Image (tube, rainbow, N blue to C red):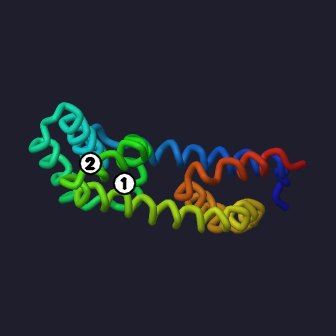
Amino acid sequence: MQPSVPKKLTRIVSVVAVFIALIAAGKASAQTERERMIEHYQMGAKYFHEGRYKESKAEFEALLKMNPSGDDAVLIRERAGIDELIMLWREPEFRALIKPILDRSLERSEELRRDVENIGKYIKQFESEDSRKVWEAIYRLARIGPFAVPQLLDYLSLD
């Protein structure tokens, strides 16, 4: 017979594993492809604000050539701020360069929002005796990211 582990401890360990996965996902080698994308965006925005439009366009074009995913676009939007992206989008010469980033980030945000509806289901999987289900829940919650945090904290407060 296996020794029983208190439910509270199981909850804490499961939530900590999700947070560790979230943190680990944010760390990578010094110059990942995502970091290069962000660098292209930042340089493009810097050149734009300096009035160096040709260089700015070249940076945004380089960014788009890297084909950022929805997750990449969300990160760029979070780092840049939606106001800055909209300001760039309003400039006719930059609209075609910024629109794909806005579109992809909005599409991915909607996907994540829909996943939020499943957070409760994933959290319930922490109670499973099947470790594969527990790790699947950890993986899925880590992919959902910050949207899962409030419900994870609620889960920790349960008796």
Under mark 1, the amino acid is Asp
Q: Residue at x 18, y 53 (%)?
A: 93
Going by the image, does 63 lie left or right of 155? left
Whichever of labels 2 and 1 marks the residue nearer the N terminus, that label is: 2
**Viewer-side residue, 58 vs 9:** 58
Pointer 1: residues within 10 angstroms few (<14), some, or many (20+)?
many
Instruction: Name the mark on residue 37.
Output: 2
Residue 119 occupies which quadrant of the picture?
Answer: bottom right
Going by the image, does 49 lie left or right of 101? left
Q: Residue at x 50, y 60 (%)?
A: 109
Mark 2 and mark 1: Cα distance apart in space: 8 Å
Discs 2, 1 touching: Cβ within 8 Å: yes
Q: Give percent across and percent down for residue 118.
A: 66, 67
Work out which residue is located at the far right of the displayed protein and give it: 159
Under mark 2, the amino acid is Met
Q: Give the residue at mark 1.
A: 72
Is residue 50 positioned above or below 5 on the image?
above
Pointer 2: residues within 10 angstroms few (<14), some, or many (20+)?
many
Q: Residue at x 22, y 53 (%)?
A: 94
Badge 2 element: helix
